Amino acid sequence: MKFASSENVDVKKNIIIFIIISLILFFIDRSDNKYFKVTRSAINDGIIYATVVLKSPFNFISDTVSSFNNFFVDEKIIAKNKLLDLENEVTKLKNEKITLLLQLENLKKITGEENYKFETIKTKVLSFKSNILSESIIINKGSLHGISSGDPIVKNNMLVGKITDVNFSSSYGILITNINSRVPVRIGEKNYNAIAVGNPSNANTINLDFLPKEYSLNEDDYVYTTSIDNIMPDGILVGQIKKDKQDKFYLKPMYDFNQMDYLTIVKMGK
Amino acid sequence: MISFVNRYIASIVLLLSVLISSFEITILGKPISNYVNLQLILIYVFKISNPGLNFGKGIFLFLISIISDVLNGLWFGTSGILYFIVFAVAAFQASIKLRSFFISEWISFGVSLIIAYCVFFGLEFLHHETIYKNAQTTHNHMTEIMPLLTNFIITLLVYPIFWFIISKLVSQNAYR
């Protein structure tokens, strides 16, 4: 039989032990040890798929609630919403057509069909996670499917993000709006090179770093990836140049980050 | 079953908060987890409102921290260090008090958050040093301070709500 005070001593001892274990784990993980990497991949896969299973009842409840709510919504509102959705879809398709034509012309001029020489693989997004500093996704494909760290994540030839860490059958990716994201891009018809960096103060905009000393950008110029050092395939659409209230240029991503169910990974084969 | 849930309510609620935080509820276009660190509040409030509660002598807390690291794509141990810093401050505060005094608990929660966020900033610094050591781009750490500061202030301000809910309604039966 233990007294309350002895249990408290145990807990204090355990707190110190677990802080030390956490620090050791942190530094081992940081050191990129290859044996630990294998263990880590196995643990990651196990926890990720267990979480998907554990979360399924909550997903079911959330889907049921939303369908229950829809049941009581006025039919006129439903029809109006559908009309709005269709209008949005038409606008989106028109935009896509314009961007694809522009992109095709640009690709022909500069890199031919380089965009298509890489193999792609379709994946499902298992989880979208956002914490203080980073927005990341977990997908259901990993090293067993040929995915490697740094591979770009795309959808409809628009850049969504890139893979940061690979497990056996799942991988982590960050979005291009993430403050840790760095993407080499070229801008507009003049093909200025720059680095697109996530903006921490506004989740839906991207900053442009390393622009030339003298540049003249036009609003609505399209921004594409560029294949410097073979980090990214050339010609994936990233976004459009916009001006803020202080007449400062920024990059607005083309992709709607609310639609993240299925995505495509371009295998760079590193 | 009910008594099991009652006994392990703190660990269960903390685990659920880690799992459910991937359902994005947005405020002003940003997910709620950008504003509030729910897990740190839960650990502190559960420990303060029931000093006998130890998250299975810290073992459950450690396991939940590993799950959190995996789901957030953080290095192993990152969440563990933060969780145990807050837990240690809460355990200390719970052991020195004779009776519950809300303001002093709130202030010591603020102190534990400051320590935890300073450590988190340091760990993030190491993370970026590793990621960008070979890259040709620069990384401005100052850009990370504002989101952390916002998160710190809102987490501190939200604390009384959780304190009221947990200390008055939930935590009376939990002792693990």
Image (cartoon, coloured by chain):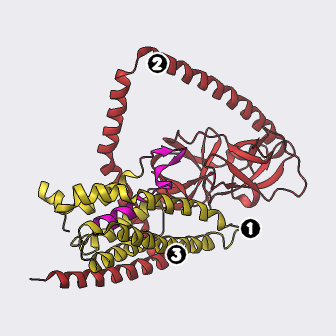
Apparent colour of chain B: yellow
In the picture shown, does residue A94 fall above or below A141?
above
In the picture shown, does residue A211 fall above or below A253?
below
Nearer to us of marks 1 and 2 is 2
User: What's the distance in space between the residues labelled 2 and 3, CA to CA?
Assistant: 53 Å
Apparent colour of chain A: red
Element carrying mark 3: helix
Q: Is B171 covered by the magenta stretch? A: no
Q: Determine if marks 3 and 1 fall on one subunit.
A: no
Q: Chain of mark 3?
A: A
Horizontally, is B133 left or right of A20 in the view? right
- Residue at the spot 36% in from the left edge and 27% down from the top edge: A69
Disc 3 target residue: A30
Q: Give the magenta part as a residue range.
A: B23-47
Q: Is residue A39 visible?
A: no
Disc 1 target residue: B136
Q: Residue furthest left?
A: A1
Q: Determine if marks 1 and 2 fall on one subunit.
A: no
Amino acid found under the numbered disc labelled 1: Gln
Horizontally, is A226 left or right of B175 in the view? right
Q: Is B42 covered by the magenta stretch? A: yes
Q: Image quadrant for the C terminus of chain A?
A: bottom right
User: What's the distance in space between the residues labelled 3 and 1, CA to CA?
Assistant: 21 Å
Disc 2 target residue: A77
| Image spot of residue A192 (x, y percent) | 84, 51
